[in-house]
Image (cartoon, coloured by chain):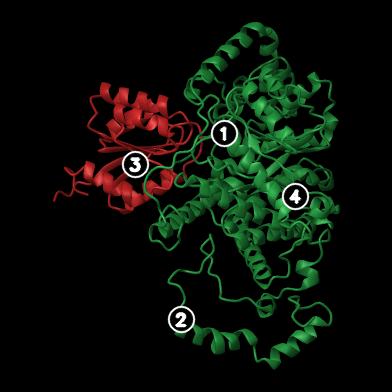
Amino acid sequence: MSDKHIRVLVAKPGLDGHDRGAKVVARALRDAGMEVIYTGLRQTPEMVVQSAVQEDVDVIGLSIHSGAHNYILERVIELLKEQEAEDIVLVVGGIIPDRDVERLRALGVDAIFPPGTMTSEIIDFIRKQTSHVAA
Amino acid sequence: MADDPVVTEPGVEKERRASSSADNNGKARWLRQSYEPATAHCSERDVPFITASSRPVEPLYTREDLADRGLSYDRDIGYPGEYPYTRGIHPTGYRGKLWTMRQFAGFGSPEDSNRRFRRLLESGQTGLSVAFHHPTLVGRDSDDPIARGEVGKQGVAIDSLADMEALFDEIPLDQVTTSMTINHPACVLLAMYVAAGAKKGIERKVLAGTIQNDVLKEFIAQKTFVFPPRPTMRIMGDVIEWCTAELPLWNWVSVSGYHIREAGSTAAQELAFTLRDGMEYIQVGLDRGLDIDDFAPRLSFFFNAHNDLFEEVAKYRAARKIWARHMRERYGAKSPRSWWMRFHTQTAGCTLLDRQPRNNVMRVTLQALAAVLGGTQSLHTNALDETIALPTEENAIIALRTQQVIAHESGVTNTVDPLGGSYFIEALTADLENEAEEIFAKIDELGGMVAAIDDGYPQREIQESAYRYQKEIEAQQRIIVGQNALTEDGAQPIDYLYIDDSVEAAQVERLTALRRRRDAGEVQRALDGVRAAAGGDDNLMPRILEAVHAYATVGEICGAMRDVFGEYHEQPIF
């Protein structure tokens, strides 16, 4: 087992201030032994991808409640492709209407966690997706 | 009556002592002789007996719990409409007038929201409450690059006076009261409302309503901040002065615990941080040389109604008592209207689930009942679909009907403060008050609320409580029906409102047309006026009003202030 930790960027795009979920998840991931970088609020897709590449993370976790998920996620995925960083696992939490979920999954979002998700479920998912990196 | 909870009411106190000595400390005896043997026979359920704020709850409360807390009926509980107003600010409770049923609404274009407002008014709603979209909340226009994807999504897109006029088209602003949830740009949206009234020929002195304008809570919880803390307090001073002089029926602030609670605080933290923010605003008015009794009566509050029925009722009662006491004793207010803690309530959005979503109606009902038993002045009940989207018209009407059922069918409005005198409620009220006082002392020690925000104290406390709550759910110490227990397989889809991106394109187009149509020179001069007032000591409001009348936009006016005041960036911590 390597001593390298799973590195996760937790970011909060959008103009809203609903950061309770992002912070609770960030803390749960850290308590589970992952290295967590939390960017804070009002992150643009450009800022998210730049931080992810700079910090060499394994996972990006985005918390979106503003209704801007379609624009934000399409742009993040596009920028990850440009940066040849598509291997980064992309997970999303927050309020994403059903009718957008399937399309976003097809575009390259690895998981979408709705309100009420247990943090243990998120931790398990990230561990499985990053099994090449020991937690 | 020997069982009266009131321990020092003349005559009763003597009787209490007599009965207390006669039964040799009744509660301890009962625990020993009845409760413990019963639990030995059939043990307590294996769950922590705690409130929604993780406060331990005892198996029974008796008059001894009131005596232990040193409660006096006359001093601490009293009568409705009389100091310290623990039992309500009005002697008649809801026998005179029901609370205002005020559903928060706003989505899409100004015309979309105007239609919803008119539908709600036709359905018996008695006041309006405007939800603005996020670009407006953070002082940006719909065509600003950072607004991409957000236009009209979580509220109505309002960029200029033209949008405000469309929003209130055919609504008689001299006959409804309007609440607007807007904070750092509140000065701009208030000016737009006044200007929209003026265009209809309505004098500003008859306009009645509320602007949230709770600038400090933005740093603590809601996080739709624009300016740094100190400039926001200067703007606050200008708004207080201007409203006191010009808008006698307008509540210049709605000090909000709602967002603090949604961010994860406990009931006591919600109570303490909110009331302490209110005191900070009182100080701003006093520092401007205003007479407290001229402006304090137009300060209002806004609280959350979370799941724990009794804790919430106690919270509202404690808030009234604390506010009255501080206003009279600490700030020397003479008018009872300054002592009144008047409040709006909204049921807790954070408690709603997207699983088995129809169960949310029951959650909302219980939360709304707490608000009513707590004596709220106005109420928003969430729709069952609000954890997924903004409400559909059908769900918005069910939410309104929930209030109407409580008001007309439940019987709880027949008497004032029906839970007053309950041993449990009075003990909880006292405990919440004491906990709030401890938090005030901590904030005073840090040098007031602005200094406490710089320190990150309220932010950290809220985060700790939010994380603890989540851990309790994950450990099943707290059962949430449909989330960590009693779950059902398979999705249970409901219809919900979907705002598509055509709203954004249309709003951007409309804004572009406005920018072409208006007098660019007049806009520029007006914005220079705002900038000059921001840089000097003149009140900002008259300059903002001129800019609004020139059809300068929210983004432009806030931009002129940003030039002088700078922009707030939060230090991210978790």
Q: Give the side of residue A134 with respect to residue B483, left or right.
A: left
Tag 3 and tag 4, C-beta contact below 8 Å? no
Alpha carbon separation for disc pair 4 and 1:
30 Å
Mark 4 or mark 2: name the one nearer the start of the chain: 2
What residue is disc 1 on? B392
Badge 4 element:
loop
Same chain for labels 3 and 4? Say yes or no: no
Tag 4 and tag 2, C-beta contact below 8 Å? no
Chain that the image shows in green: B
Residue B177 pos. (x, y %): 77, 35
Label 2 crowd bin: few (<14), some (14–19), many (20+), radius 10 Å: few
Residue B273 pos. (x, y %): 61, 52
What residue is disc 3 on? A37
Same chain for labels 2 and 1? Say yes or no: yes
Q: Give the side of residue B28 with respect to residue A67, left or right.
A: right
Q: Residue placed at 70% from the left, 47% from the top?
A: B404
Residue A104 pos. (x, y %): 35, 29
Query: B400 and B247: which one is in front?
Result: B400
What residue is disc 4 on? B342
Mark 4 — on which chain does it sit? B
Q: Residue placed at 68% from the left, 24% from the top?
A: B167
Mark 2 — on which chain does it sit? B
Q: Report which colour depicts chain A.
A: red
Tag 2 and tag 1, C-beta contact below 8 Å? no
Alpha carbon separation for disc pair 3 and 2:
49 Å
What residue is disc 2 on? B42
Report if residue B259 is visible in the image: yes
Badge 3 element:
strand
Badge 1 element:
loop
Q: Residue placed at 71% from the left, 65% from the top?
A: B419
